[in-house]
Image: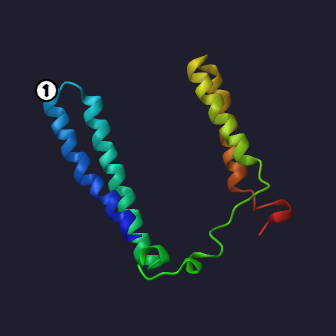
Amino acid sequence: MRIESWIFGAGVFFFVPISIIYGFLTNWSEWVGILGILLVGGLAGMIGAYLGFTGKRVGMRPEDRADAEIHEGAGEQGHFSPWSWWPLVLGLSCAAGFLGLAVGFWIVFIAGGMALVALVGWVYEYSRGDHAH
């Protein structure tokens, strides 16, 4: 994960000076853009730091080595639920939330409740029922 952490870490050194240049070009009158670019730089720094710490903890992956073979990256990549309906419900509730922003704000409250139920259901899917651990 060395390459990924360097790419995101370099984002800090790119976006922070760009926000200062943007501030000078707008005579420090447009604060939304300045703050937005600074926040993007902070987000890039946080992602780069996370990937750096994770890379030190996990070690070298086959993608990080020049002499790696394709078969070294084979195997299980994670745990996914192919039969789960909760991501669909969560996606529909997010779509309803955006619809509420466009049509009527009262829909946002219903969509927020649906999203909360879907998120809790998705997180605790393996804590009860047939697939409890």
Report the front residue among 128 and 51. 51
* Residue at the image point whose x is 13% and y is 26% from the top: 27
Q: Quadrant of the N terminus?
A: bottom left
**Residue lying at the far right of the rendered structure:** 130
Residue 39 image point, x, y percent = 32, 43
Residue 87 image point, x, y percent = 70, 47
Question: Is 8 displayed left or right of 71 in the figure?
Answer: left
Q: Amino acid at mark 1?
A: Asn
Question: Is 98 displayed left or right of 53 in the figure?
Answer: right
* Residue at the image point whose x is 48% and y is 77% from the top: 61
Q: Locate residue 52: give its quadrant.
A: bottom left
Residue that numbered label 1 is attached to: 27
Question: Is 78 displayed left or right of 68 in the figure?
Answer: right
Q: Locate residue 133: give its quadrant.
A: bottom right
Q: Is residue 105 above or below residue 47?
A: above
Residue 60 image point, x, y percent = 44, 79
